[in-house]
Image (cartoon, rainbow, N blue to C red):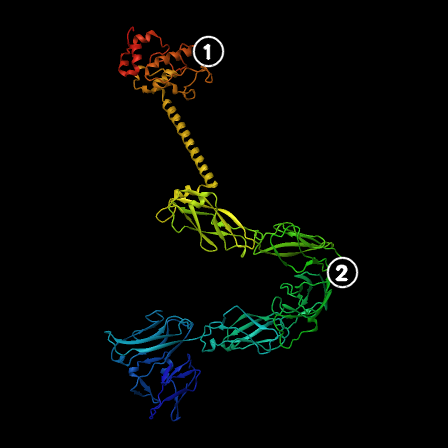
């Protein structure tokens, strides 16, 4: 229900309106009075609403009474006139036009309405509908735009309705535009904006952002210390009581040392401490149940939800480490290092394996030389008293140490180390049989090389540290690579057993090292070693040699010749400068060569003649050093004379001939030759074997195509004279047949065995095929004389193929019946190889 009120203000200033019953009515800044809810005036004689107006400039106030008429009581749906024809309702009910437009106040629609739909909201009309028929429509989201169809309007009456319940959490307001057109679609009035606000209802519970919140606070925290913040959200309007949350703590577990150690800010959710007494060693964590309620925490109308908060009490170093006993005991053998002497145990109530729990041990007295240290075992937190420097029993036999234990971090403010954080350690040193010690080690002496055997050098002795024990020390040699020295086992006197040579490969930088050992007779025996360094002084004991020992020279050498020098193992002044001279013998040396001195280190060798044939020449050269007692030596320079190219380099083949081959090269060449011969032999054998196999395959052909096989094997009855396509060349070499290569057919039971040793004669190779008859007669004679042949009138065994053969019988080669019935004249047409057969069978009586 709506009524518009206007106060006439001649000053034209800003007027502020206020209604006397704000719970049931509301007045806009334009003077429109709205009902806040549906009012039932049935049974009430009067309904009066007081409306106040105040000029904001002059502070002048006015008031008026608004009494709804009977018509107003029956009209429940508010009506909106288009602003282009806005009017003002006076107290006497008359209308007056205003020159300015007014704004349509928003329409408030509660969400989640359960009324009947469509539900009327407002009626929109134009004052021009009295003269003509108009049509009304609304546009915008919720009408003709998504979400479509939430709001509809009666096109004739202008009644605006909502079609279903609204949800503020989905859409909080709608902006529509109302239109008025005539029946022809012509716009009658300008569109007006309609804002529909969805009024929030408390239909959503608060929701915590986490089901379980985790926080922490150090133990011993003062009251007012911040712990953590819990947060809940409400989908309802946060500007109304529906979305205003309040927090509180429902329970605390455990309730020690009190039940209200923590409190929560009911608006922000901040949890702080309100009492002292947090001790991690007693209570490690607290569990709080937090409740969030909307409607500003109203327990009657508000909706609530709960969450769990776990507060962990973090450790601080409020408990110092304390030794489990006042005195610890340990013992260790002398001269031992990195040995644990005693385990120091402490207790600490702080959280294990933290800096507030880990102990650090420090020796405060009793160890001025720093022979002990106390590292910490990270697992057990024990202190490990360890020897880090050797201890001599003969000097110190016991220690009394004072030890203090602290944590890795400082103690909390106000906490001090108690007496239990300090302890004493009694350490006893145990005596052992110590090794004799050479002094000094290494010991250095200087000697000239060439010292003869059995020469005394020096005395190298060791001392036994066990002065309280009377023990005997004996000496021996451990390492003497050249075996030059010996030591007296009793007094340590060192003598030579061989000549000392500075040029020996065992001497490095003129130093020769020998290691000796000294052993006592303790139980168990102990031994120590010492090194003797012998510095050998050089003497002139090595004659020089020509260097390089081999050179190359062309047959027609360069006039500059070849430069040579000398090699002397001795040191200066027992080496260079050198004197070079050609030997006088053989006599051709000085006739062919000349040697000139360049300086004290080099000389030049040249040919005295114009050229020299290729070959190897040995030139004797005598070289003398510059020692106090000079030493001379005649050494041979190997000169390889060869043919050279235009660069002056030896040709490769000539270089090889001139240089000669070494033993290794000769052996390698012989091995290659042997391998090559073996490969050639294997290849010849393989070729010979392949030829034999090829010949055997040529002979082992089908008997139907081989005339010679028919004659030798006699295992074919058919074929006769009708088979004329024979390869008669095979008859040339019947001696190539081997007994193992002859094919046999199916044997009869009365056939002679195959393993007999009877040998049939082989025909020797003939220059022409005329000897085939002799070969056949020889075979016939051998078959007649064979005692193993079966008693048949055939020459050789052949297989039985049955009766009815179209071929003639071969029962006898001398059968007269077969000869008379056959015409062998065609044998003469087969060539010279069958001329003898043609003479035998086709030649008539001859």
* Left or right position of 817 against 638: left
* Left or right position of 547 against 373: left
Tell me the residue that label 1 is attached to.
787
Q: Mark on residue 678? A: none
Categorize mark 2 by other alpha carbons within 10 Å: few (<14), some (14-19), many (20+): few
Gap between marks 2 and 1 measured at Cα: 116 Å
Give whichever of discs 2 and 1 has the lower sequence position. Answer: 2
Q: Determine the residue positioned at 60% across, 68% down.
A: 354
* Residue depth check, mark 2 versus mark 1: number of the one nearer the observer: 2
Answer above or below: position of 537 versus 239.
above
Can residue 314 be seen here? The reply is yes
Give the secondary structure at mark 2. Answer: loop
Image location of residue 253, percent across then percent down: 61, 71
- In this rendered view, identify the residue nearer to me: 301 or 485: 485
Give the secondary structure at mark 1. Answer: loop
- As drawn, the residue found furthest toward the left would be 184
Q: Are marks 2 and 1 in contact (CB under 8 Å)?
A: no
- In this rendered view, identify the residue nearer to me: 780 or 210: 780
Tell me the residue that label 2 is attached to.
468
- As drawn, the residue found furthest toward the top would be 845
Categorize mark 1 by other alpha carbons within 10 Å: few (<14), some (14-19), many (20+): few
Tell me the quarter of the picture where residue 397 sits.
bottom right
Image location of residue 690, percent across then percent down: 39, 28
Can residue 706 be seen here? The reply is no
**Quadrant where the N terminus lies?**
bottom left
Answer above or below: position of 831 versus 213.
above
């Amino acid at each position: 229900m709506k009524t518009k009120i206007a106060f006439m203000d001649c000053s034209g200033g800003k007027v502020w309106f206020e209604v006397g019953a704000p719970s049931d009515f509301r007045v806009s800044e334009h003077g429109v009075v709205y009902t806040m809810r549906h009012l039932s005036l049935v049974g009430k004689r009067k309904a009066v609403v007081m409306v106040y107006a105040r000029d904001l400039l002059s502070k002048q106030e006015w008031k008026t009474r608004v009494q709804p008429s009977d018509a107003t009581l029956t009209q429940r749906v508010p009506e909106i006139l288009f602003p282009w024809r806005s009017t003002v309702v006076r107290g006497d009910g008359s209308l007056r036009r205003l020159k300015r437009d007014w704004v349509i106040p928003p329409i408030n629609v509660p969400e989640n309405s359960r009324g009947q739909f469509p539900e009327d909201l407002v009626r929109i009309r134009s004052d021009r509908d009295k003269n003509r028929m108009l049509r009304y429509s609304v546009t915008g989201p919720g009408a003709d735009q998504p979400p479509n169809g939430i709001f509809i309007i009666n096109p004739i009456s202008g009644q605006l309705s909502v079609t279903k319940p609204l949800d503020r959490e989905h859409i909080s307001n709608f902006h529509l535009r109302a239109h008025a057109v005539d029946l022809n679609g012509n716009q009658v009035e300008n569109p007006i904006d309609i804002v529909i606000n969805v009024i929030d209802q408390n239909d959503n519970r608060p929701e915590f952002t986490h089901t379980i919140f985790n926080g922490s606070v150090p133990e011993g925290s003062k009251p007012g210390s911040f712990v953590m913040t819990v947060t809940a959200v409400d989908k309802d309007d946060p500007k109304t009581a529906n979305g205003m949350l309040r927090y509180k703590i429902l329970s605390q577990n455990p309730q020690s040392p009190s039940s209200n150690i923590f409190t929560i800010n009911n608006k922000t959710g901040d949890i702080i401490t309100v009492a002292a007494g947090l001790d991690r060693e007693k209570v490690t964590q607290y569990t709080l149940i937090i409740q969030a309620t909307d409607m500003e925490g109203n327990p009657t109308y508000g909706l609530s939800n709960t969450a769990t908060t776990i507060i962990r009490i973090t450790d601080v170093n409020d408990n110092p480490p304390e030794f489990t006993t006042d005195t610890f005991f340990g013992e260790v053998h002398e001269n031992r290092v990195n040995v644990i002497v005693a385990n120091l145990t402490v207790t600490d109530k702080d959280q294990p394996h933290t800096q507030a729990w880990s102990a650090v041990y420090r020796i405060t007295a009793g160890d001025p030389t720093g022979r002990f240290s106390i590292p910490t075992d990270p697992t057990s937190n024990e202190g490990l008293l360890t020897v880090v420097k050797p201890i001599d029993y003969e000097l110190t036999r016991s220690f009394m140490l004072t030890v203090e234990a602290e944590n890795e971090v400082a103690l909390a403010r106000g906490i001090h180390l108690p007496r239990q954080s300090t302890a004493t350690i009694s350490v006893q040193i145990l005596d052992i049989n110590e090794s004799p010690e050479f002094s000094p080690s290494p010991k250095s002496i200087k000697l000239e090389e060439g010292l003869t055997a059995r020469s005394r050098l020096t005395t190298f002795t060791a001392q036994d540290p066990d002065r309280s024990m009377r023990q005997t020390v004996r000496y021996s040699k451990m390492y003497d690579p050249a075996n030059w020295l010996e030591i007296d086992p009793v007094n340590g006197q060192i003598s030579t057993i061989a000549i000392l040579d500075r040029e020996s490969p065992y001497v490095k930088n003129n130093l020769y090292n020998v290691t000796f050992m000294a052993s006592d007779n303790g139980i168990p025996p102990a031994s120590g070693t010492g090194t003797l360094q012998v510095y050998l002084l050089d003497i002139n004991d090595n004659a020089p040699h020509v260097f390089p020992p081999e050179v190359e020279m062309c047959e027609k050498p360069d006039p500059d010749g070849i430069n040579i020098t000398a090699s002397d193992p001795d040191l200066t002044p027992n080496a260079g400068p050198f004197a070079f001279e050609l030997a006088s013998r053989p006599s051709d040396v000085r006739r062919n060569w000349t040697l000139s001195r360049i300086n004290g280190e080099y000389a030049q060798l040249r040919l005295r003649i114009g050229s020299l044939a290729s070959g190897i020449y040995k030139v004797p050269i005598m070289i003398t050093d510059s020692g106090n007692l000079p030493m001379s030596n005649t050494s041979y320079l190997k000169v390889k004379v060869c043919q050279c190219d235009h660069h002056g380099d030896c040709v490769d083949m000539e270089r090889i001939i001139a240089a000669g081959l070494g033993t290794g090269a000769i052996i390698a060449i012989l091995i290659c030759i042997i391998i090559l011969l073996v490969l050639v032999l294997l290849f010849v054998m393989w070729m010979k074997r392949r030829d034999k196999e090829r010949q055997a395959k040529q002979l082992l052909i089908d008997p139907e195509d081989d005339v010679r096989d028919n004659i030798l094997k006699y295992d074919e009855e058919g074929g006769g004279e009708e088979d004329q396509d024979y390869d008669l060349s095979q008859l040339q070499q019947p001696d190539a047949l081997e007994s193992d290569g002859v094919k046999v057919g199916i044997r009869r039971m009365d056939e002679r065995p195959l393993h007999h040793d009877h040998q049939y004669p082989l025909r020797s190779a003939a220059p022409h095929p005329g000897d085939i008859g002799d070969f056949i007669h020889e075979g016939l004679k051998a078959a007649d004389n064979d005692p193993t042949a079966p008693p048949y009138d055939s020459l050789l065994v052949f297989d039985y193929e049955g009766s009815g053969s179209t071929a003639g019988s071969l029962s006898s080669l001398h059968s007269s019946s077969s000869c008379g019935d056959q015409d062998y004249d065609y044998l003469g047409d087969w060539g010279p190889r069958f001329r003898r057969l043609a003479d035998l069978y086709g030649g008539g009586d001859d």
